[in-house]
Amino acid sequence: MGIKTVAVYSDADKDALHVQMADEAVHIGPPASAQSYLVIERIVDACRKTGAQAVHPGYGFLSEKREFQEALAKAGITFIGPDAHAIFAMGDKIESKKLAKAAGVSTVPGHLGVIKDADEAVTIAREIGYPVMIKASAGGGGKGMRLAWNDQEAHEGFVSATNEAKASFADDRVFVEKFIEQPRHIEIQVLADGHGTALYLGERECSIQRRHQKVIEEAPSPFLDEATRKAMGEQACALARSVHYKSAGTVEFIVGGATGEFYFLEMNTRLQVEHPVTEMITGLDLVEWMIRIAAGERLPFSQADVKLDGWAIEARVYAEDPFRNFLPSTGRLTRYTPPAEGRNVRVDTGVTEGGEISMFYDPMIAKLIAYGPNRQAAIGHMRQALDEYYIRGLSHNIPFLASLMSKERFVVGALTTNFIAEEYPAGFRRDDLPAGDPTTLIAVAASVEFAQASRSSLISGQFSGHEVTVPEQWTVVMNGKYHDIVCRRAESGFAVVVAGEAVDVNTDWTIGQPLFRGTVDGRPVCVQVDRVGIGYRLSHDGLHVDALVLTRRTAELHRLMPVKAPPDMSKYLLSPMPGLLRSIEVSEGQEVKAGEPLAVVEAMKMENILKAERDGTIGKLHAKPGESLAVDQKIIEFAA
């Protein structure tokens, strides 16, 4: 649009991508958001220093703070978003529910008053009837939210939600409402110009959530029919008009899976993280229209002009370990190569190779968006893009995303907000990954090793007449099994024989490339290849497999080598993530019962309560409150 940009950044973000991309950048403080991104005066001062005429508030932090909009207006700076009145009326979950109820909009049963303490929260929860949801009034992104099924969970949930709300939003108010079972989370994107025009741009299906934070979003929803879409859209626009809304906004509804009845949940008076899926199917750039509306322009199109074309799915790529109950993973991105973008794939990211995912902010690495003419095509493009997403240096959730995409229930669109809890009742395990065809990875491993051996034979010192020849017979050791194979060069790649069956590997892969792209028996594949010792780690469809490719004689000797058992760490409570040890709830010599809290570790502004898995006695404390913990660091040792 020809508008120059200014980035603001904290100490933790000095090398972030948005800082590199902007025309100017202004430092606003230390890493803690309460001392940088949440300090209104520092943002206003950055505008004054640079002469910025407008501020786009992004997704979080001050984006729904009335005081921020008012401070900018006082300084003569345009806020790219709604006015303070709309932010207050709709951005606050408690006030927005009161307004919606007064306007005749169906709302979820609950207690909208501010709750003074945990005991009152328990009393209110009992009156409403379990299960209940405890929510931060100023919350978002899953922060300050707890589901409670009984008095104890309501008490603990109130305390944690209040602490997280204060840390994340500088507002510790929480409320309680009935938790609708088997629900779908569907939101309507609205766009209003402040001149009387308010339009809805279809819906987004956001039911795939974990810890109340969205993981997969798609547009349109596989659940809605045109009549329901129209009813929800018109209700969302009526709500927006009631507060004279202008800019982009999202009205969220909870929809009963059996009845299809919908209830107003909240309105987000800002741009949503998942806005790209709406952009992909409408062809409208929401950020551009936010800027144009803020500049006073009118929307030049009507509701009849809004058309939904195709299907788009967004997956949130997080720095977290799905095999450790999705605990945050901090560290440096030693290798980072996102999939190539095009008509069917879009990547929105704020990081680059060599960048760091710190403990101070949300652990999202990127949003991966896939598009197709229909839902099945979009899922196919997403699975391919996940295979091509190369991230090293920290744990990430791509294996989990690949598993989600392969679930039959997801493929047919049978979604609820309970999807993850029901499909992964014991948490995410390696057994949840798609089984796949081992022949593909065996053939790829053999091809990679044959290429390596061929190059080595050409650069080794050799005597004429005694050249090193590359053997064609090999053994691939994978998952504890030995597979005798034959591999030789072919015109367009490699010819491999696995279990007596010929496998054609067509590829232009060269040594050193992390992605092995090509076809295996005509099927397109992309396998990530990492050298690990004398073997390889192959990543495909979310699965990580270690493979050794040995000559037949070496394989015979390998079978005779003993397998070393890992050390027994069962008597220790280990930190499941890097973070700050907030408190230790036990003392040496104390007897504990299964389920009792042992320690509280804070990471990414989230409190994680570590509980005893079984009855026992505390032997020794290895860490102190206030200490920064590394992953797997000892916290408590149990007595024998």
Image (tube, helix red, strand yellow):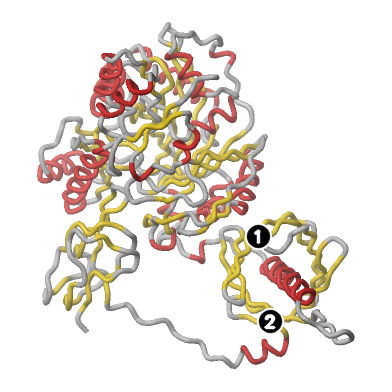
User: 247 or 201, which lies in front?
Assistant: 247
The percent position of residue 100, horizontal first and vertical second, equals 30, 21
- Residue 27 is left or right of residue 600, and the answer is right
Q: Which residue is mark 1?
A: 527
Q: Which residue is mark 2?
A: 550
The quarter of the rendered structure image containing the N terminus is top right
- Residue 529 is left or right of residue 495, and the answer is left
The percent position of residue 394, horizontal first and vertical second, equals 45, 58
Image quadrant in which you'd find residue 528: bottom right
Q: Is residue 609 at least partly visible in the picture?
A: yes
- Residue 97 is left or right of residue 457, and the answer is left
Judged from the image, the secondary structure of the residue bearing numbered disc 1 is strand
The percent position of residue 293, horizontal first and vertical second, equals 45, 13
Above or below, 504 against 12 in this view is below
Q: Which mark is residue 339?
A: none
Mark 2: which amino acid?
Leu
Q: Residues within 10 Å of mark 2 (few under 14, many from 20)?
A: many
Residue under the image location 27 percent in, 40 percent down: 168
The percent position of residue 84, horizontal first and vertical second, equals 28, 17
